[in-house]
């Protein structure tokens, strides 16, 4: 892969990975342990934070994909890039809307059943995305 596009893609991928790790695996679980943060407040904050994270993820994905496409990627880089995009799309198109439906109901004062399965899907996809981003970042470092 060409050096300049590889450098841009590598930067975008590792910034994206850092954001996922910081928000999904650090901030999110800790917010519900803070004094005075009940489920409604936590979900309201989470909705805002994840909306911002997802916008940043889409932007970083577009930057990384453009750089990867411009840099004549190896097969491994192309495959990992495709996998991470499929994971992100699955989260945004399939899982997040279902989680948002429950959040809407809780914020409206209702007490819907827990959405444990959807949360597990999201966490599983988030872990897979983090691992894929790490592998893609390393491959880009080697390729560049």
Image: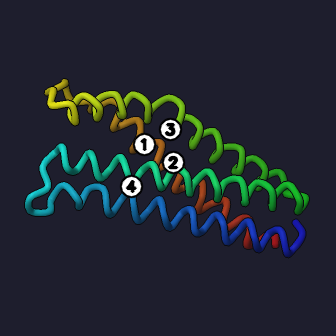
Please say if 111 is above or below 83.
above
Q: Position of residue 71 (x, y in %)?
A: 88, 62
Q: CA distance from mark 1 to mark 3?
A: 10 Å
Q: Position of residue 103 (x, y in %)?
A: 28, 35
Q: CA distance from mark 4 to mark 1?
A: 19 Å
State the residue lying farthest toward the left: 36
First along the sequence among labels 3 and 4:
4
Helix, strand or loop for disc 1: helix
Please say if 35 is above or below 91.
below
Residue 2 picture quarter: bottom right
**Label 1, residues with CA under 10 Å away: few <14, some 14-19, many ≥20:** few
**Label 3, residues with CA under 10 Å away: few <14, some 14-19, many ≥20:** many
Mark 3 lies on residue: 91
Please say if 108 is above or below 61.
above
Helix, strand or loop for disc 2: helix
Mark 2 lies on residue: 128
Q: Position of residue 37 (x, y in %)?
A: 14, 55
Q: Which mark is residue 49?
A: 4
The answer to whether marks 3 and 4 mark residues whose Cβ atoms lie closer than 8 Å is: no
The answer to whether marks 1 and 2 mark residues whose Cβ atoms lie closer than 8 Å is: yes
The answer to whether marks 3 and 2 mark residues whose Cβ atoms lie closer than 8 Å is: no
Mark 1 lies on residue: 124
Question: Where does the N terminus fall, quadrant-wise?
Answer: bottom right
Identify the residue shown where x is 73% and y is 72%.
141
Identify the residue shown where x is 78% and y is 50%.
78
């Amino acid at each position: 892969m060409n050096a300049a596009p590889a450098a841009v893609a590598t930067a975008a991928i590792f910034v994206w990975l850092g954001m996922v790790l910081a928000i999904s695996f650090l901030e999110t679980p800790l917010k519900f342990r803070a004094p005075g943060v009940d489920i409604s407040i936590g979900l309201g904050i989470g909705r805002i934070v994840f909306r911002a994270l997802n916008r940043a993820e889409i932007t970083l994905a577009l930057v990384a994909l453009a750089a990867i496409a411009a840099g004549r990627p190896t097969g491994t880089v192309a495959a990992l890039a495709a996998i991470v995009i499929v994971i992100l799309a699955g989260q945004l198109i399939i899982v997040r809307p279902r989680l948002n439906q429950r959040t809407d109901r809780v914020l409206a004062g209702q007490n819907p059943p827990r959405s444990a399965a959807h949360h597990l899907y999201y966490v599983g996809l988030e872990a897979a995305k983090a691992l894929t981003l790490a592998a893609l970042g390393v491959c880009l470092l080697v390729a560049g």
